[in-house]
């Protein structure tokens, strides 16, 4: 089985929709994926993701097949970062706030004191649990760190969501802390991350990423890459965000 995790187009966060640039990005994405044999379309309930999904599904004449899943919405949550800084999202910590915290690298990252009592652990387990249920529906049942291939297949499912949430999904599929993904990777708008199952022993599968954050459709279409989710490349930049 193949999973495509697709971030929404360039966002207008205030109105929860795509900017004009985001619409151009989504249109290029739709053309790029037009000949992909996508088995199922799943979307976050947030407008910017649904709009992106509609571009792709409509290009294939399958707009009515979109299934909206509430748990694919962005992974926002109030937390207290290490060293006491308050935030309403669990990523975008400064390097000095997490780099020297060993627990942030573990599968029990959510037990770190900065998350204690925030409900973040429960939210993470709820989202990853829903992911497991979806995969079970498509023939793969989670057993420990391996997926039992009850109905092995070559289907493709597309998940249209958000960078923070994508990192959570990847952390489950690849058995790692999302903190590492949140802070060392960035999936730009309309980028596509691809994972395949590998069933090297009959009935036992794991997911392996063959491409993270692919933006080939934008580069080939002459559309500049969005800066959304990135921070300043050099500190002296006055036009790129720092915090």
Image (tube, rainbow, N blue to C red):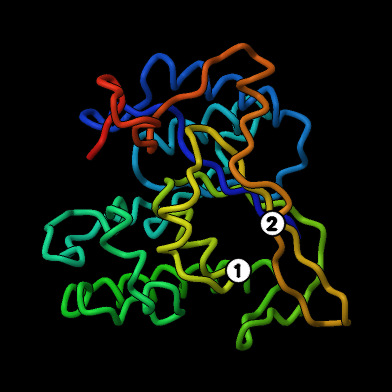
Q: Quadrant of residue 226?
A: top left
Horizontal relation, residue 187 to residue 241: left or right: right
**Residue where numbered disc 1 is placed:** 174
Q: Residue at x 51, y 23 (%)?
A: 225
Left or right: where does residue 108 sit relative to residue 201? Answer: left
Judge whether 173 appears above or below 109 on screen: above
Q: Residue furthest bottom?
A: 144
Q: Is residue 135 above or below residue 241?
A: below
Q: Relative to the observer, which residue lies in front, 14 or 101?
A: 101
| Residue at image location 80% in from the left, 68% down from the top | 198
Kind of element beneath mark 2: strand
Q: Are marks 1 and 2 in contact (CB under 8 Å)?
A: yes
The location of residue 66, given as percent across then percent down, is 53, 43
Task: Measuring from the top left, give residue 14's x and y in whole percent.
Answer: 21, 30
Q: For the C terminus, which image quadrant?
A: top left
Label 1: few (<14), some (14–19) or many (≥20) C-alpha neighbours in 10 Å: some
Residue 203, given in percent of the width and then of the height, sits at: 82, 82
Q: Relative to the observer, which residue lies in front, 153 or 78?
A: 78
Q: How much space separates mark 1 and mark 2, taking CA atoms?
A: 8 Å
* Local secondary structure at mark 1: loop
The residue depicted at 60 percent of the width and 21 percent of the height is 218
Q: How many marks?
A: 2
Work out whether residue 38 or residue 172 is closer to the camera in this orientation and state it: 172
**Which image quarter holds the N terminus?**
bottom right
Q: Which residue is mark 2?
A: 209
User: For residue 133, what is the image quadrant?
Assistant: bottom right
């Amino acid at each position: 089985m193949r999973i495509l995790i697709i971030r929404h187009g360039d966002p207008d966060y205030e109105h929860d929709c795509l900017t004009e640039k985001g619409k151009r990005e989504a249109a290029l994405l739709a053309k790029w994926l037009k000949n992909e044999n996508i088995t199922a379309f799943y979307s976050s309930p947030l407008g910017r993701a649904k709009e992106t999904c509609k571009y792709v599904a409509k290009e294939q004449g399958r707009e009515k097949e979109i299934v909206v899943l509430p748990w694919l919405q962005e992974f926002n949550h109030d937390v207290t970062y290490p060293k006491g800084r308050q935030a309403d999202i669990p990523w975008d910590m400064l390097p000095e706030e997490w780099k020297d915290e060993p627990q942030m690298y573990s599968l029990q990252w959510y037990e770190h004191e900065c998350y204690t009592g925030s409900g973040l652990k429960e939210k993470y387990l709820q989202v990853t649990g829903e992911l497991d249920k979806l995969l079970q529906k498509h023939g793969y049942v989670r057993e420990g760190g391996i997926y039992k291939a009850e109905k092995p297949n070559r289907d493709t499912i597309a998940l249209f969501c958000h960078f923070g949430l994508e990192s959570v999904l990847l952390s489950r599929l690849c058995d790692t802390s999302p903190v590492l993904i949140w802070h060392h990777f960035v999936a730009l708008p309309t980028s596509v991350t691809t994972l395949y199952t590998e069933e090297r022993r009959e009935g036992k599968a794991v997911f392996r990423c063959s491409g993270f954050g692919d933006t080939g459709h934008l580069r080939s279409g002459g559309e500049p890459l969005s800066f959304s989710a990135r921070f300043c490349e050099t500190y002296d930049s006055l036009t790129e965000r720092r915090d």
